[in-house]
Image: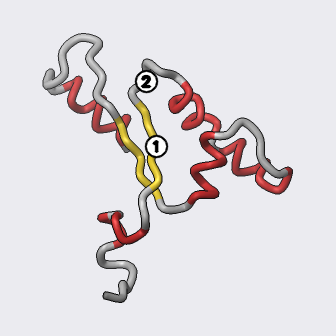
Amino acid sequence: MAQSVEAVLKDLKVIHGDFTFEKLLCGDNTSAISILTKPDGPWRTCHLRLRSTCLKEKLNDPNSGWMIRHLKGTGLIANFLTKRFKG
């Protein structure tokens, strides 16, 4: 989705030239993040590693602008209306 937004901004001439913006992915699933950031994993995650190859390449390229960060579930905006929090 971030690639699509970047393409639209380039088409609208909001972004000029080879300018790229940082794309930060935030998630609360440490297993999914480790599959993306570590080179190897258990054999049972082979199908997940194959599906995530494109994103792994973007995260490993220092010039791509892609980053990933772990956040607690209570800090994710997407979880606001989908999970019940005690407090």
Q: Say above or below: 58 vs 80.
A: above
* Rendered image: mark on residue 68: 1
Q: Residue at x 24, y 32 (%)?
A: 8
Between marks 1 and 2, how big is the CA–CA gap? 12 Å
**Horizontal arrangement in the rendering, residue 87 relative to residue 83 (left or right):** left
Which residue extends farthest right? 43
Say which element carries label 1.
strand
Residue 60, position as x, y percentages in the image: 56, 27
Coloring applied to the structure = secondary structure
Where's the C terminus, which quadrant? bottom left
Q: Residue 44: x, y in percent?
A: 83, 56
Above or below, comparing residue 80 to residue 3 in the picture: below
Residue under label 2: 64
Q: Nearer the viewer, residue 19 or 72?
A: 72
What crowding class fits label 1: few (fewer than 14 Cα within 10 Å), some (14-19), or many (20 or more)?
Answer: some
Query: Which of the two discs, 1 and 2, sits closer to the camera?
Result: 1
The amino acid pointed to by label 1 is Ile
Q: Quadrant of the N terminus?
A: top left
Side (left or right) of 2 relative to 58: left
Q: Are marks 1 and 2 in contact (CB under 8 Å)?
A: no
Res 11 → quadrant: top left
Q: Give above or below for 28 relative to 16.
A: below
- Residue 75 appears in which quarter of the rendering? bottom left
Residue found at the very far top of the displayed protein = 17
Q: How many marks?
A: 2
Callout 2, which amino acid? Ser
Residue count near mark 2 (Cα–Cα under 10 Å), binned few <14, some 14–19, many ≥20: some
Q: Position of residue 76 (x, y in %)?
A: 35, 63
* Residue at x 42%, y 69% (from the top left corner): 73
Residue drawn where x is 28% and y is 28% of the image: 21
